[in-house]
Image (spheres, helix red, strand yellow):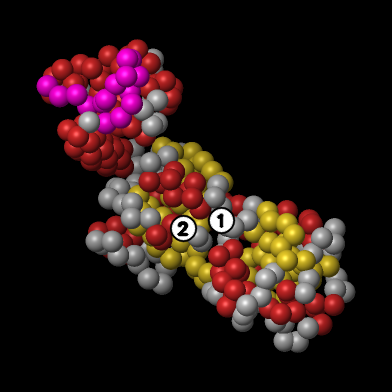
Amino acid sequence: MKLQQLRYVVEVVRRDMNVSEAATALFTSQPGVSKQIRLLEDELGITIFERSGKRFTGITEPGRAIVERAEHILFEAENIRRLGKDHSDGDSGTLVIAATHTQARYALPPAVKAFVDRHPGVQLILHQGTPFQIAGWVEKGEADIGIATEYLEAQPGLVTLPVRQWHHCVIAPLGHPILKEHPLSLRALARWPLVTYDSAFTGRSSINRAFERQGLAPRVVLTALDADVIKTYVILGLGLGIIADLAFDPERDTRLDCRMARDLFETNMTRIALRRGIFPRRFEYDFISLFAPHLDRRAIEWALRGNGETYQL
């Protein structure tokens, strides 16, 4: 039995029985993957995959048990590799951060700059995506650290740690009547067309809940994946914008004005996510502490050791 054979089996399962896609992901050939899986089945004396001709169509009952153990073995092999590299060459390698646009554009730059200055031998890769994509990348090991507001905390394969609380604000063109509303209310907002985040992003669920609780139906005329797009269309007069407060910069956004909406919408929490059971390298601890200074190594290790518990701010 070879580790690579287990890797082939797990990747075929991840790719919904598509051997061709698994081979591409593993930088090998389709016949090579099929051959190694057959050799493993012969060695074990069981059939892992159900077949129709040469196609894999499902997993057998004993195959499911094999896949589960194989995933565990590969996970621990990855931890051993990380441990070895951390001691042999602790300040080189690759760090993959997955974050939403708002975090990547407005919250991460100071931490990224400080990290690059401190760890010139580490290649930092930044992926942007939806919270759903970010969770998947971290769970599959395709990203080391995930950063988002939505979705992460509910995933059992992730350990999440709180970074900071934030609120929404309402943006409008200069001189807009909404800026004279005191106090600002959801009923007043509901009278105007609104431009805000896509349903999967940046606290959008808390916006929806706020209007629903008051029996209001906001007229959302446009949704976008990031605050910069929202601001563009607010300037064009399509509607009022509801964005994360950290995305408004009065020095740059000179054609807009902003009203804080912390009394209208729930407080939101940005979270960092790590794959449960993973061994973080030293520079990963360092990046997290640069981004969230209250999360030192001790706090991160405490969270990683927890049985389904998450560290609370």
Q: Residue furthest right?
A: 175
Left/right of residue 267 with respect to residue 21 in the rendered view: right
Q: Front-most of 212 and 304?
A: 212
Residue at image x 62%, y 80%? 214
Which kind of residue does numbered mark 2 sit on? Tyr
Residue 270 bears which disc, if any? none
| On-image quarter of the N terminus | top left
Which kind of residue does numbered mark 1 sit on? Ala
Indicate whether residue 292 is drawn in magenta: no
Q: Front-most of 109 and 151?
A: 151
Segment tinted magenta in the rendering: 45-59
- Mark 2 = which residue? 151
Residue at image x 33%, y 26%? 57
Q: Is residue 6 above or below residue 176?
A: above
SS majority, magenta? strand
Left/right of residue 161 with respect to residue 291 in the rendered view: left
> What kind of element bears circle 1?
loop
Q: Front-most of 222 and 272?
A: 222
Q: Front-most of 27 and 79?
A: 27
- Mark 1 = which residue? 200
Residue 249, position as x, y percentages in the image: 72, 65
The first of marks 1 and 2 along the sequence is 2
| On-image quarter of the C terminus | bottom left
